[in-house]
Image: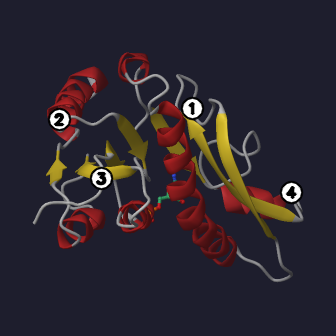
Amino acid sequence: MTDPRPSRTPVAILISGDGSNMVALVEASRAADCPYEVVLVLSNTPDAGGLAKAAALGVPTLAIDHRPHGKDREAHERLVDAALRDARADYVALAGYMRILTPWLVEGWAGRMLNIHPSLLPKYPGLHTHQRALDAGDAEAGCTVHLVTTGVDEGPILGQARVPVLPGDTAETLAARVKAQEHQLYPAALADLVRRGA
Ligand code: GRF
């Protein structure tokens, strides 16, 4: 069946795991006024749960295992980059993609690669963000969508969502509250970026 909507901007999503943000991005793309469509979901781990979810949503999937390339990150990235370009992606959304990227890949997609991070950046780049927020006694936590630059979890902020830290919170309960916001924030921030770039 022909899509009656005007042509939309092709986006690829990189995942390593469960892919709940990927699912949120794909589901949001089905709205009539969404300016992007997801043309590829690519994982560096062949057994990522998100791959089956993407396939069930009718999105093309690909796994490019990083392990055969050992420490040669760029060799793996060259295959990833070729797949992104084959898919004709204009933007790349990182959604739980657990690889540190080389400047080669980042610079090749400058301004067109974005990431979601589960903290209110610049607070808590890196891992264990929720535990760190609890340990610091923060009254609020949240998530950030940002453009990807060569520094890890740096780059211009495109949007943030905040949640309260509640008495008795654990890293798990806080993570779940933040993640519900991630699923709202990421599609909205991606759509805004695509509209501005159109
Ligand atoms: C999310 O918390 C995201 O902020 C971080 O990695 C996690 C991915 O979760 N970058 P999911 O695979 O989208 O469920």
Q: Picture coordinates of residue 9 (x, y %)?
A: 34, 42
SS at circle 2: helix
Q: Is residue 5 above or below residue 49?
A: above
SS at badge 3? strand
Q: Residue at x 28, y 21 (%)?
A: 74
Q: Which percent across, then down, holds residue 89?
A: 27, 37
Amino acid on which the number 1 mark rests in the picture = Val
User: Residue 2 falls in which quadrant of the image?
Assistant: bottom left
Mark 3 or 4, nearer chain start: 3
Image mark for residue 152: 1
Which label's residue is closer to the chain start, 2 or 4? 2
Q: Nearer the viewer, mark 4 or mark 1?
A: 1
Q: Residues within 10 Å of mark 4 (few under 14, many from 20)?
A: few
Q: Foreground residue, 73 or 121?
A: 121
Residue 171 seen anywhere in this rendered image of the structure: yes
Instruction: Identify the residue at horizontal 45%, vertical 62% (top origin).
Output: 21
Few, some or many C-alpha atoms within 10 Å of disc 2 (few <14, some 14-19, many ≥20)? some
> Disc number at residue 38?
3
Between the C-alphas of marks 4 and 1, the distance is: 21 Å
Which residue is located at x 29 percent, y 57 percent? Answer: 5
Query: Which of disc 1 and disc 3 is earlier in sequence?
Result: 3
Q: Mark 3 and mark 4: span between their CA atoms?
A: 38 Å
Q: Nearer the viewer, residue 21 or 159?
A: 159
- Counting from the top left corner in percent of width and height, residue 99 is at 39, 39
**For residue 166, what is the image quadrant?**
bottom right
Q: Amino acid at mark 4?
A: Ala
The answer to whether the beta carbon of the residue marked 1 is less than 8 Å from any atom of ligand 1 is no
